[in-house]
Image (cartoon, rainbow, N blue to C red):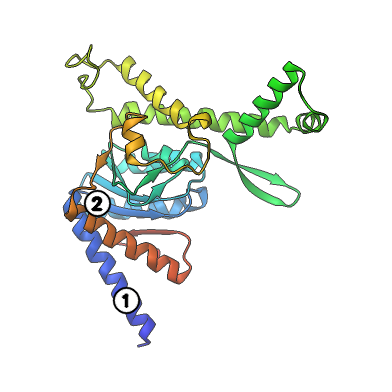
Amino acid sequence: MHASSLLDEAIAAWLRESAEKLEAEFNADVLSYVGPIHEAFLRPFRDFIEHIAKATDRKSLALFLNTGGGSVQAAEKMVEIMRHHFADVSFVVPDMAMSAGTVLAMSGNRIFMDYSSSLGPIDPQVLVRRDEGEAWVPALGYLDKVEELIKKSADGTLTPAEYVMLKELDLAILRAHEQAKDLSIELMKDWLVTYKFKTWTKHRTDRLKKGKPVTNAEKEERAREIADMFCNNKLWHSHGRLIGVGKLTGILRLEIEDYSSDDNRRGLIRSYHDVLTDFMARTGTMFCIHSAHRSTL
């Protein structure tokens, strides 16, 4: 057998064993999703979830997520697929889950990160067709620029060049951007209230309300606050801003399960995730779903 084949087999065996150790650590089925969130990957994702659900008796899923983002609509369908089979879903973010990945992570009962992990601002990507081809465009950046030009027009400070830009705007694309933003906020709000805030029954940090029951209206208000802050470009300044645990728990006051000080758990997560992503880089693989029971590698 060729040496590279032997190496690949050894890596595959290592990854299976590592995933099994993580299943014991989290007392849940473990699935890794590495790559863009896109409708094209929904079928293999569905097949993986169905296979895992049939292979074990566990009712909990720990999804290891590493993504630069993608389609919010695809993220919504992924949640529907997972929740059909698992009542309890946790997200583990060893590296980063940006944009639509952040929206997806908000559907978890828990989010696990360490000090080097990152989520990102919610700036939904809209597929725009142009003469030179298709391109994913950040919706919020587009909307912010339009808002700026409209304000300058109202103030009488719009330049001739900016007038031409405003005049040539495609209203259908503009509306698609607005809808993508609205969908991201609504999904995040609904998922936070339904899943992440499920066990939030009493106030813990509000000095005036501490110990008192949390109402559904208060959960909805808090979820809307978090969603609005994630969508606030004026707060983050960049679509690619890497938001770490400190800012998530400090600025957004979002509860994160921080495993930075848990050497055993951090070691298990990193050894599995780093080997998986290094192997993908070596083989030029841009997308992968992996579990102890099945793999696209």
- Can you tell which quarter of the image residue 85 is in? top left
Q: Position of residue 254 (x, y in %)?
A: 32, 31
In this view, the residue farthest toward the front is 157
Query: Which labelled disc corresponds to residue 29?
Result: 2
Instruction: Say if 62 sits above or below 192 in the image.
Output: below
Secondary element under disc 1, as helix, strand or loop, is: helix
With 135 as the anchor, is 60 left or right in this view?
left
With 7 as the anchor, is 160 left or right in this view?
right
The image quadrant where one finds the N terminus is bottom left
- Can you tell which quarter of the image residue 107 is in? top left
With 100 as the anchor, is 14 left or right in this view?
left
Q: Position of residue 22 (x, y in %)?
A: 21, 55
Instruction: Identify the residue at horizontal 45%, vertical 54% (top origin).
Output: 35
Kindly report the distance in space between the C-alpha atoms of the residues bearing marks 2 and 1. 23 Å
Instruction: Identify the residue at horizontal 36%, vertical 85% (top origin).
Output: 3
Residue annotated with mark 1: 9
Residue 122 versus residue 249: which sits nearer the camera? 249
Secondary element under disc 2, as helix, strand or loop, is: strand
